[in-house]
Image (cartoon, rainbow, N blue to C red):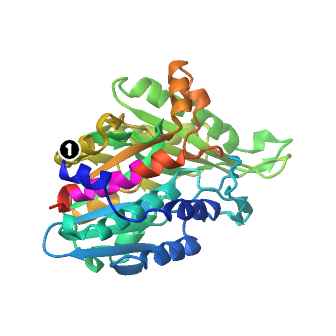
Amino acid sequence: MSDIARLLAHHHADLSWQRACYEDLHEHPELSGHEQETSATILSMLERFDCEVISPIGGFGIVAVFRNGDGPTALFRADFDALPIKEETGVPFASTRLRPGADGVQTSVMHACGHDMHTTALLGACALLDAHRDAWHGTFLALFQPSEENAMGANAMVADGLLTRIPRPDVCLGQHVMPGRAGEVQTTAGPQFAACDSIRITIPGRSAHGSMPHNAIDPTYTAAMVVIRLQGIVGREVNPNDFAVISVGTLRSGSTNNIIPASAELVLNCRFYDESVKRRVYAAIKRVVVAECQASGADGEPSFEFFAHGELIDNDPTVFGEVRETFDAVFGDESVDAQRTTVSEDFANIPRAFGVPYLFWVVGCTPHEVWDKAVAEKRVKEDVPVNHMNTFLPDYEPTVDAATKAAAAAVLTYLGT
């Protein structure tokens, strides 16, 4: 057994507060950019540790700096915003909150992506390292990031002086709970989460009375043809060995029954593992949209607005090899290979800003009996709740234990004595 595995198996840190912390975070979720209460909760939890707290950074961002003599610096990041979803888990600590959404309308709010677990685990790792300072040296940075769901939080922290306000890390680390056997720690080198962009496309037309379509240039019709043609880009222009997704998230056109509107709006979500594939697909999207507008006789040009960018999470092979060796020692058979996933994250913006290598991994959070039965019956897609579903809820004990120890073990890989 390695020294890190032995330490984590027989630690004397008090983690008894974690369940209450997790349930409190889960019951009181906040949307991206509005995480004032959550930030205050994290700050109050950090008061129990011997660390310097730097806050706010980039809205409600927080960095806790644990200094312990000379040595390397390792950063671990957790996010803490929630989603505009009505919770249907049925647990006693389920969220019943209503908050104004992006459109100003009251909406239900839920921790449907596991960020409450991420935060609880990182606070637990803080407790472990603070209680065992004789086992490491250097500087540990616990970074708590807001606004991951809208892909703005990491860049906001960087823009607010993150690079000069905290010590420069030698490595950045992070994790995400996802469907999988609860407690499994899944790692891989290379692409782990896909790169993504959202694109808002405005299609011009000419308004007229609904009874006189010959006087109009109907942007709804143009938009419908664009939607159809977009599917052909992935189906006919992307090599089947490559990966690309073009999903139409919204199509908005018109506001009443008897007026052909002056414009229509499409919002796309696109994901890739390869930059060259992304460039070719974006060129094809523009070609299709422009051509359909011309085919409809539109007077103006369509517009394209890119937003909600997520960098490809491309794990450093050297960091993977070093941390994976630790995980194998700590978790044994529960340390497994990860499959790359098509979801996206803005974590990589932080190590990219510092210019340092990183590793981002997945922790399974599905109850064993649910996962094993679904796998055996080949019904994973049907029977296993996934992130962003209103029934998504990590199996607490094995998930928090694995996520807390994985965070500490990864940091100790670089700081451990």
Horizontally, is 256 left or right of 61 in the view?
right
Q: Nearer the viewer, residue 100 or 263?
A: 100
Residue shown at 56% from the left, 63% from the top: 20
Residue 408 in percent (x, y) is at: 31, 57
Q: What is the magenta range?
A: 402-412
**Magenta stretch containing residue 299, yes or no?**
no
Question: Looking at the image, which residue is at 64% across and 61% down?
Answer: 27
Q: Is residue 227 above or below residue 22?
A: above
Which of 120 and 316 lies nearest the eye of the viewer?
Answer: 120
Q: Position of residue 194 (x, y in %)?
A: 39, 43
Residue 57 makes an appearance in the image: no
Relative side of 60 to 73, left or right: right
Q: Main secondary structure of the magenta part?
A: helix
404 is within the stretch colored magenta? yes
> Which residue was labeled with disc 1?
1
> Where in the figure is residue 204, as x and y percent of width and height?
62, 50
Q: Quadrant of the C terminus?
A: bottom left
Q: Quadrant of residue 134?
A: bottom left
